[in-house]
Amino acid sequence: RITEILGQRSKLESESIKKFAKLSVAIVLLSPSAFFFAAFYADALLVLAFYLAIYWSLQSKYLQASLACALATATKSIGIVTIPVMLLIMLQQSNKGLVEFIKENFMRIVVYGTIGVGGLLAYMSYLYIRFGDPLVFWKIQKYWESRSFPGFFVFTLWRIYYKNIFHPAYFGSTLGYIYHLIAMLAPVLAVAIAFYLIITKKTELVWLAALVVMSAIIPLSAGGTVISSNR
């Protein structure tokens, strides 16, 4: 449905829209991380919340979209990216400048943003009650692979992954090398898509540019690996 909405706004032919819609679903289902949708992970629920937030935002149903954002932030912390995406769609649909938009919609921005982050706040409250630390989910990241390498996350990723891109043996096996190679391309592709949308001045899709960049960069900057970023 999201593809259909974007296709209609781009004034594409109905047959082309249907083809792109089917293709988009196929790409999602055939991606290397699609198996998480059938496993006991939170990813399937997170993707559902992502799609609902975007879908309702595109239909100007921002209350429903903010509730979907709350579900996303309650599911996984990366769900926080749905909130700025929802607000960027609001900005784009208002056909107004940023300053004017904020002045006229300040209370709506605060209310919808607060609702959206409510899922994460609820989870942090639980962690505080249960463990005495609302940020334990963040602090535990130091026990993962990338946290064992100090330094700015870009340099860390370079040392662990990209510097060894032409050394398959470093990744243990041919299958491991292929999987890591696909995963390493994901952040690069995300930034390339965002850059393309910006230089082609597709302002109606600025929210999409923000989404692909934040979805790739935030997990990595928080200590995630390139494998987890692919999810």
Image (cartoon, grey):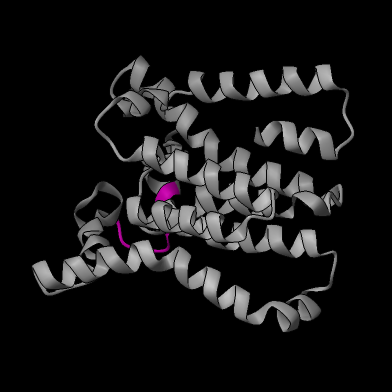
Position in image of residue 39 (x %, y %): 28, 27
Q: Left or right: where does residue 222 sit relative to residue 195?
A: left
Which quadrant would residue 92 be assigned to in this image? bottom right
Position in image of residue 144 (x %, y %): 23, 50
Image quadrant where one finds the C terminus: top left
> 202 or 117: nearer the eye?
117
Position in image of residue 184 (x %, y %): 48, 36
Residue name at image x 69 percent, y 77 percent: 105
Residue name at image x 77 percent, y 44 percent: 196
Residue 209 visible in rendering = no
Let me know if residue 161 is in the magenta part: no
Q: Which residues are magenta?
A: 149-157
Residue 96 visible in rendering = yes
Q: Compared to 134, does 19 lie above or below? A: above
> 107 or 204: nearer the eye?
107
Which quadrant would residue 150 be assigned to in this image? bottom left
Residue name at image x 49 percent, y 27 percent: 182
Q: Compared to 57, does 51 lie above or below? A: above
Image quadrant where one finds the N terminus: top right
Q: Left or right: where does residue 89 sit relative to residue 36?
A: right
Q: Compared to 29, does 152 lie above or below? A: below
| Number of numbered discs on residues | 0
Q: Left or right: where does residue 140 sit relative to residue 186?
A: left
Residue name at image x 46 percent, y 59 percent: 80
> 224 or 211: nearer the eye?
211
Which quadrant would residue 147 be assigned to in this image? bottom left
Position in image of residue 171 (x %, y %): 33, 27
Q: Compared to 92, does 106 lie above or below? A: below
> 212 or 177: nearer the eye?
212
